[in-house]
Image (cartoon, coloured by chain):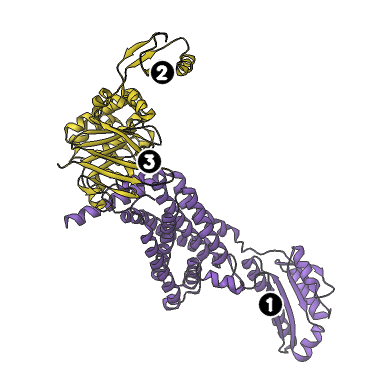
Amino acid sequence: MKDDVTIINCQLINKAQALKDVSFEVKKGEIFGLIGPDGAGKTTLFRILTSLISADSGQATVDGLDVATDFRELRKHIGYMPGRFSLYQDLSVEENLQFFATIFNTTVEENYYLIQDIYKQIEPFKRRRAGKLSGGMKQKLALSCALIHKPVVLFLDEPTTGVDPVSRKEFWEMLKKLKTEGVTIVVSTPYMDEAQLCDRIALIQHGKILSVETPEKIIAGFPKKLYQAHSENNYLLLLEVRKNPEVKSAFMSGEYLHIVFNGEADETVPNLKEIGPSIEDCFVYLIEN
Amino acid sequence: MIMKKKNNSQFFAFVRKEFYHIFRDVRTMLVIIGIPVIQILLIGFAISTEVKNVEVAVYDPSNDEVTNRIINQMDASEYFNVTRRLKSANEADEVFKKGQTGLVVVFCEGFGERLYHTGDAAIQLLIDASDPNHGTTVSSYAGSVIAGYQQELLQETNVPVRINPEIRMLYNPEMRSAYNFVPGLMGMIFMLVCAMMTSVAIVREKESGTMEVLLVSPVKPIYVVISKLVPYFIISWVIFIIILLLSVFVLGVPISGSLVWLNIFALIFIIVALSLGLLISTVVKTQVAAILASGMGLIMPVMILSGYVFPIESMPPILQWISGIIPARWFVSGAKKLIIEGVPVRFVLKEMLILLGMAILIITVSLRNIKTRLE
């Protein structure tokens, strides 16, 4: 039972960011998603796991190393990509990569195969300053820099926030490829649609883990029937539906209203149709209960 | 051995990166190189050694043949114009304050009588020395006019007479000439380049989030900060040499002491300034705070308390005592000795040891302050 990342009762008591009873395990070679809204404590959790800050109490091990006591050794084996673009804007693409390779005691050539697919997309711009890259290219460069030393575990804090949909899709394809190289990936995202792409996800809200499961199981665990509805004015419809005592919960999801009834569905709601739940539905349901 | 080699290459990667940061930031480069050059040149051009048509006021209570001849000779020279006659010696102060008069000549009572009878007469020269170079020149020209007359008198009468010119420099009695400012200027520039620039450079990494990435790497945080100091150390030395060259060739400052010791002494001070920058960077979180801390905490005291602007000897005792903890004060006093007085190095041993002690203390404190994690 040698798990790659094992986190047990990691607690951080902090006025701004409170993590309470966060406990989960990540298995070797999986893509583990931390899904939750802004301010849920994702970044704090990442910083504890990457030894950047200390937890107030509790214990966490990454790759068998305690994040509090073995941090020197740990820092040789992990890769971390913070949510904010954190490379040198005034260095070129190539110089950034070279620099990070050197400080991790390796060379670009040594692990080039690992970043090849990503890096060759930005290679035409290798002499450009990193600050002048587009958002998607910046993320690709940051990922390349975080990967250049072939980390055992890769921590990605909201890597796709502020990135266009096409680049986001490409980014997730890269993560899948990395997984086949045996890299364990812990990734956080506020986007529910990305949750489906993880092997297992932890739903986190207000510093608490609501559920740790595979996306399929989370969806299968949805206890009620879910309906969608829509009308000319969805907002008015939402207000109306919420007044209905039969309705357990209702919220807007894109162009539709998603409704859960206490008992039988109220057929008077316009354009009512039963649908399968998504991660978002499960998340909302978990929060409300 | 392999590990050591790797550490070295890490270190060089950091230093190279730091040079990229500096050279690619054109504005910073301009500040670093521009400020010393401009300051030195400003001081250089502000010095005017040409003295012509200085307005002279005379107080002549004896009003005899001798005094009139002296006054006429003075007026006849191209250097002086006698424009005013004073009614009392007390008027001299007033006349100076009006600003046009550069020299007041005060004869003693019965000047001619005394000169012929006792062979000894007193003349007082009051000189506005707020521009020190100007003041010295005026004094020597006036002295030579008087000496010339004395010579003349000797040939005419064959009586050995002595005119005693008593020279008083007003407003700048120490005769602090412009090049006396060079050591103080160096002290200030090193604070600017070393302390301010390094603290900003280190804090920039915190602010831009790159420190986060560096901390999650095998590199020890101490290497990160020390590698920041190296480029600024080199640049400061280059600036020191630029200032020295400009001082010698533009200002004509004679460097009378040992150049080698002067360099060693400056390098010690540069290390002190760098470690102050390091200390600030371990305490503050934003670049603005770093600039404020180094500006208010370092550069202001250097200007006011190091003896650069105000002479330490004329400060109240409490300020003199406070100036003792300001590294630049010891640098300025040591550098003055080495550059202007040209004394052997053993006379600046005290300054050198104090600066070394400060360097060791500050470095120890800041290295203890370096964090291996985010706050």
Q: Which amino acid does label 3 sit on?
A: Asp
Q: Residue A289 carries which label?
A: none
Q: In this view, does B56 lie to the left or right of B282?
A: right
Q: How crowded is mark 1: few (under 14 residues within 10 Å), some or many (20 or more)?
A: some
Shade of chain A as shown in the rendered figure: yellow
Please determine whether, in this image, residue B61 is positioned above or below residue B276: below
Q: What residue type is labelled 2?
A: Val
Report the residue that reaches farthest toward the bottom.
B118
Residue nearer the viewer, B11 or A147: A147
Residue nearer the viewer, B53 or A117: A117
What residue would you read off at disc 3? A90
What residue would you read off at disc 1? B167
Question: Between marks 3 and 1, how big is the CA–CA gap?
Answer: 61 Å
Residue A124 place in picture, x, y as percent: 28, 30
Q: Residues within 10 Å of mark 2 (few under 14, many from 20)?
A: some
Q: In this view, does A187 lie to the left or right of B326?
A: left
What residue would you read off at disc 2? A247
Q: Can residue B263 be seen in this view?
A: no
Q: Which amino acid does label 1 sit on?
A: Ile
Question: Between marks 3 and 2, how big is the CA–CA gap?
Answer: 56 Å
Q: Residue at x 29, y 31 (%)?
A: A122
The label nearer to you, 2 versus 1, is 2
Q: How many labels does the image show?
A: 3
Callout 1: chain: B
Residue B286 place in picture, x, y as percent: 46, 48
Q: Do the residues labelled 3 and 2 touch (CB within 8 Å)?
A: no
Which quarter of the rendered picture does the N terminus of chain B lie within? bottom left
